[in-house]
Amino acid sequence: MVSTIRRIMFFVCVFGFAGGVVIASPPPQSPMSTANLIQNGGFEQQGDGWEACGNVALVDAQAAGAEFVYSGRYAAVMGVEADGSGCSQLPDLTTPKQVLRQQVSIPGTAAAVTVSFWFRAAAGTTVDVFLANNFYQFDPNLIGVKLGTFSTDQPPGWQLYRTVLQGERLERVRGQTLQFAIVIQGGTSVGPDTVLLIDDVQVIAADGRTAASPLPPALRGDGSRPLAVIRVEGQNHWLYRMDTDGANAQLIYRGLLSNVRYPAWSPDGRRIAVVDNNTWPWPTPDPDPQNNLSASAITVINADGGDARQVYQTQSRKGSRCPFIPGPGNPTETPSLIIRSSSVQWLPDNNRIALTQT
């Protein structure tokens, strides 16, 4: 049985996490003017209008030390203690770990439907998003659509999830009463540190994409401001750029070891800096894999993906015991030191980069 969202008063600590599609997102924007078909999309009336199971909860920005809402006072929090409690078994004999959902009616006259929400995530699990009358194993013969899947292994900060339904996908929802649902499936592994914060959920009967901004010719795809995007393909984290509507995706950098994170545009829009995770020593690894410690480079790439160059490399330190094997606790032993970069940011002069190391 799905119940209303429980309210919890605690500080959700989400910071310094690694990067599937991850967008280097802009600052918060003003709400869209089109009417929101979702009731209580910002959770400001707490759980009103929503159903949930599996320990979905609310975080209160006015609780001591709390700050992780996108706007207003409340946000929904998933991932924490996701145990399937109160969730019904599905026809495929699995039970979801968590479901956050609300019934929504799509006008039969809708020229497009835009589904969006802001999320902030940490640690690794997989999240499915539906606008459909069922949310287990999506069947094209069922009403509605599966909007997409994303990972909670994300960079720090709030990210925008947005999908515009047109054409055949629009026809599947137009004039229907459906469930908007964010689901962590039953077969998904949810780590003890997984956190997914959700805020400002919107379903509007219009094309709600951000208007394009003029750019220099060298940066134009379809005339829209390009996005620096980390896409997860298997075990690989690669850097893409694409237009703001998701079109014209171009793979521009694979990384030193296919583990690229935290893209940042230079202020003049001509270059992208990324954290390029690798090992130390680098570029010549130790023949013994046990001696290769995790490390990071800062790589700068031209906007078109050319001229990739490493401008900085962290230097981890090999101790008297390998970090991957528990030591016996001998105080005379020196543990290895792993140094990685966890963020990168350009200074206004376009020539200097600030970074953090952890």
Image: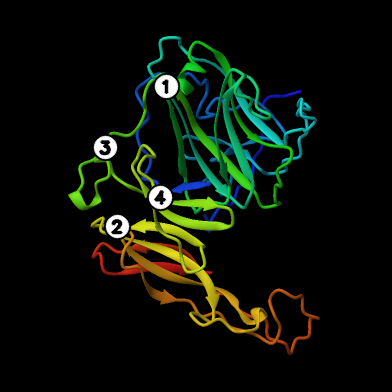
| Quarter in which the C terminus is drawn | bottom right
Residue 346: image location, x then y, percent: 32, 63
Residue 119: image location, x then y, percent: 51, 41
Element marked by disc 2:
loop
Q: CA distance from mark 1 to mark 2?
A: 32 Å
* Of residues 354 and 130, the one drawn nearer to the viewer in this rendering: 130
Q: Amino acid at mark 4?
A: Ala
Q: Which residue is mark 1?
A: 167
Q: Which residue is mark 2?
A: 303
Asked if the residues shown at circle 1 and circle 2 are in contact, with their CB atoms under 8 angstroms apart, the answer is no
Q: CA distance from mark 2 to mark 4?
A: 14 Å
| Quarter in which the N terminus is drawn | top right
Q: Amino acid at mark 3?
A: Ala
**Of the image marks 3 and 2, the number of the one nearer the N terminus:** 3
Q: Quadrant of residue 197?
A: top right
Asked if the residues shown at circle 3 and circle 2 are in contact, with their CB atoms under 8 angstroms apart, the answer is no
Q: CA distance from mark 4 to mark 3?
A: 16 Å
* Of residues 280 and 29, the one drawn nearer to the viewer in this rendering: 280
Element marked by disc 3:
loop
* Residue located at (47% from left, 34% from top): 72
* Of residues 220 and 50, the one drawn nearer to the viewer in this rendering: 220
Element marked by disc 1:
helix
Q: Is residue 131 left or right of residue 159?
A: right
Of circles 3 and 2, the one toward us is 2
Disc 3 crowd rating (10 Å Cα; few below 14, some 14-19, many 20+) is some
Q: Which residue is mark 3?
A: 212
**Residue lying at the far bottom of the rendered structure:** 332
